[in-house]
Image (cartoon, rainbow, N blue to C red):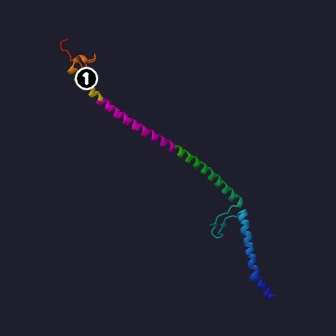
Amino acid sequence: MIGGIAGYWRWVRPRIKRAQQTATAIVETLVGREPIVDAATGKELVPAQPGMGVRLASVEDGQRTQAETIAKLTETVLKLDDAHHRLDTVETDMATIKSDVSALKAAAWERIATKAESAQMWRAVADADPDLLPNRPLEAPEDDDSH
């Protein structure tokens, strides 16, 4: 009999305690548990653990929030891509405008140089033969102070 009690105490009782602890852990996981409070001080040692349903609901809310965030990020990436494309178009247009302005400046300088050469040619023609001049004067008439 003492051998049976010692065997129970040594081998069976620890297994029963382990099974009870496992069952308690399973119930606490599924249902949840109250916070563990020190009886002497009233201080909370371990916070309350919500049940499985509450935790799954918070995970689902987190996934919903994550999906919304990913959708917003995707939209932002698309907007940035569109803005990048627009910026490339504007930069290309600016390069074209700059080259056109440079060409216009060169043409303006050429017209200025041509005007001076043309005026010099007409002066030379006037000096050579005044009858070949067009009907407009090349130089402004001098002011008469006799009026």
How far across and how far down the image is residue 37, in percent?
65, 67
Q: Nearer the viewer, residue 38 or 143?
A: 143
Q: Relative to 146, is 62 above or below?
A: below
Q: Which of 135 and 128 is in front in this view?
A: 128
Q: Relative to 106, is 72 above or below?
A: below
Per the image, is 101 magenta?
yes
Name of the residue lying farthest toward the bottom: 2
Q: Nearer the viewer, residue 1 or 126?
A: 126
Q: Which residue appears at 73% of the width and 63% of the height?
A: 30
How far across and how far down the image is residue 85, in percent?
51, 43
Packing grade of label 1 (10 A; few <14, some 14-19, many >=20) is some
Residue 75 is left or right of residue 4, and the answer is: left
Q: Which residue appears at 60% of the width and 51% of the height?
A: 70
Residue 141 is left or right of residue 100, and the answer is: left
The majority secondary structure of the magenta stretch comes to helix
Q: Which of 120 and 74 is in front in this view?
A: 120
How far across and how far down the image is residue 107, in percent?
34, 32
Q: Which residue is disc 1 drawn over?
A: 122
Residue range of the region highlighted in magenta in the rendering? 84-113
Residue 59 is left or right of residue 128, and the answer is: right
Say which quadrant the C terminus sits in: top left
Residue 127 is left or right of residue 35, and the answer is: left
Q: Which residue appears at 67% of the width and 55% of the height?
A: 60
Say which quadrant the N terminus sits in: bottom right
Dot 1 amino acid type = Trp
Q: Relative to 124, is 25 above or below?
A: below
Q: Which residue appears at 53% of the width and 43% of the height?
A: 82
SS for callout 1: helix
How far across and how far down the image is residue 48, in percent?
66, 63
Tell me the quarter of the picture where residue 15 sits.
Answer: bottom right
